[in-house]
């Protein structure tokens, strides 16, 4: 597996992420630590806006316009057009925009998988409670053919939406999303992908996935500010989605002296509304530039997978440890299970040794996420802490 990010770049990046001087940080899948230049770009933009007078219409307009380069860069990063992306605060926002915006009918069916984050399964459960939508669970396999077969068995003429992760949050399994989307479309269903664990972890081309909707955030693998994200709405599905949360920015100006007519914005900006901290997206733009400057997503992904694979080999040397993630490191996520210690307790004990992970309570396991800024020393420290603990 190639890794074209040289040691000089890794050394520089690690110096610009302060938390790495204090801990072995292996939880980018929850929140990625923003490098100092990224935080500086956001804070500088925010201070300039505040110092200029944030309520000055000219200054607010300038702050909003300063966020547009981030939309263009994120669109290029994801392989879509800028007008198909709406800025959100996180992936959960995007999921709610989609699930609340579809005109549901009682008896409609929605399929999710058994490895979803609350950002997916809580809105899914709400659909069942509020609209009488029937929820079905697709049990995943590390074998793509088995997963596709099981999906085919669940799909029916009542299936309205297949709501799944591109990369699963629990084990880092990369789903065969194009084949799943094609299968769902052949049965007349829409497809939404949660890209929270994909964007920045693996190369993403949304158009190539076939998804009708795609959500992501900036605060995980992209190392951007918390409070940044986006939802993609395809041309094919644009007319199927009614804006639910609306306000200033989501609709065209109304002339109150005439009969008011509600006309939404012509593109995905119709899903943006209200006063926002646009400086956050200046930080997101800086994060995308930072990732490019460190070698780009392909190199970062290869490095993450190499580290996860190496960690898997080292962790398995401990008696009673099993690896739940797919073999050969399909992503930068590695999930393990101990035969003697609960996942919650194991994660807590590792934290006491300054190895930061996340428990996977649904599997009684522990998740390690290896970002491109991690190195072999981090793997060795994690392996040593694991050995001492179990």
Image (tube, rainbow, N blue to C red):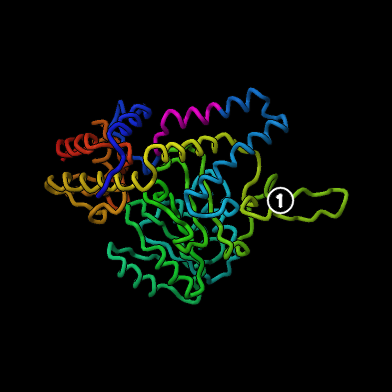
Q: Residue lying farthest top?
A: 51
Residue range (magenta): 32-44
Numbered disc 1: secondary structure: loop
- Residue drawn at 24 percent across, 35 percent down: 378
- Left or right of 279? Residue 34 is left
Q: Position of residue 253 (x, y in %)?
A: 77, 48
Asked whether 38 falls inside the magenta stretch, the response is yes
Q: Position of residue 259 (x, y in %)?
A: 85, 55
Image position of 312 with respect to 24: above or below: below
Asked whether 384 falls inside the magenta stretch, the response is no
Q: Nearer the viewer, residue 219 or 356?
A: 219
* Quadrant of the frame with the C terminus: top left
- Among the 4 quarters of the image, the one containing residue 263: bottom right
- Among the 4 quarters of the image, the one containing residue 52: top right
Q: Position of residue 178 (x, y in %)?
A: 41, 65
- Among the 4 quarters of the image, the one containing residue 67: top right
Which residue, given by chain and number where applicable, does mark 1 sit on?
Answer: 251
- Left or right of 321? Residue 307 is right
- Left or right of 295? Residue 269 is right
Image position of 174 with respect to 91: above or below: below
Q: Nearer the viewer, residue 278 or 150?
A: 278
- Residue drawn at 37 percent across, 40 percent down: 295
- Residue drawn at 83 percent across, 49 percent down: 255
Q: Residues within 10 Å of mark 1 (few under 14, many from 20)?
A: many
Q: Nearer the viewer, residue 349 or 5?
A: 5
Image position of 164 with respect to 364: above or below: below
Image position of 252 with respect to 389: above or below: below
């Amino acid at each position: 597996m190639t890794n074209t990010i040289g040691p000089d770049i890794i050394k520089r990046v690690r110096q610009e992420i302060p938390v790495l001087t204090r801990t072995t940080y292996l939880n980018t899948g929850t929140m990625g630590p923003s490098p100092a230049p990224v935080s500086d770009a956001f804070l500088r933009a925010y201070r300039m806006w505040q110092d200029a007078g944030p309520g000055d219409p000219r200054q607010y307009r300038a702050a909003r316009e300063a966020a547009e380069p981030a939309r263009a860069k994120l669109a290029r990063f994801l392989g879509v057009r800028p007008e198909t992306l709406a800025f959100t605060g996180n992936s959960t926002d995007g999921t709610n925009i989609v699930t609340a915006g579809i005109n549901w009918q009682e008896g409609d069916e929605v399929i999710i998988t058994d490895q979803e984050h609350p950002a997916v399964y809580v809105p899914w459960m709400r659909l069942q409670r509020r609209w009488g939508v029937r929820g079905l669970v697709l049990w995943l396999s590390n074998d793509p053919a088995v997963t596709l077969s099981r999906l085919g068995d669940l799909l029916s003429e009542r299936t309205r939406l297949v709501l799944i992760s591109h990369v699963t949050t629990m084990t880092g399994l990369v789903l065969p999303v194009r084949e799943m989307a094609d299968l769902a479309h052949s049965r007349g269903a829409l497809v939404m992908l949660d890209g929270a664990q994909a964007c920045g972890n693996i190369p993403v081309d949304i158009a190539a996935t076939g998804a009708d909707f795609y959500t992501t955030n900036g605060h995980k693998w992209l190392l951007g500010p918390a409070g940044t994200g986006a939802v993609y709405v395809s041309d094919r599905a644009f007319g199927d989605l009614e804006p639910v949360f609306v306000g200033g920015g989501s609709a065209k100006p109304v002339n109150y002296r005439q009969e008011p007519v509600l006309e939404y914005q012509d593109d995905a900006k119709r899903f943006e509304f209200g006063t926002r901290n646009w400086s956050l997206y200046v930080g997101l733009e800086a994060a995308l530039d930072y990732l490019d400057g460190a070698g780009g997503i392909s190199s970062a992904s290869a490095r993450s997978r190499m580290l996860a694979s190496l960690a898997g080999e080292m962790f398995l040397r401990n008696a009673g440890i099993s690896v739940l993630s797919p073999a050969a490191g399909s992503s930068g996520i590695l999930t393990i299970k101990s035969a003697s210690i609960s996942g919650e307790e194991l994660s807590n004990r590792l934290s006491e040794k300054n190895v930061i992970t996340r428990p996977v309570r649904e599997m009684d396991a522990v998740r390690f996420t290896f970002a491109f800024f991690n190195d072999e020393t981090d793997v060795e420290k994690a392996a040593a802490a694991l050995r001492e603990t179990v």
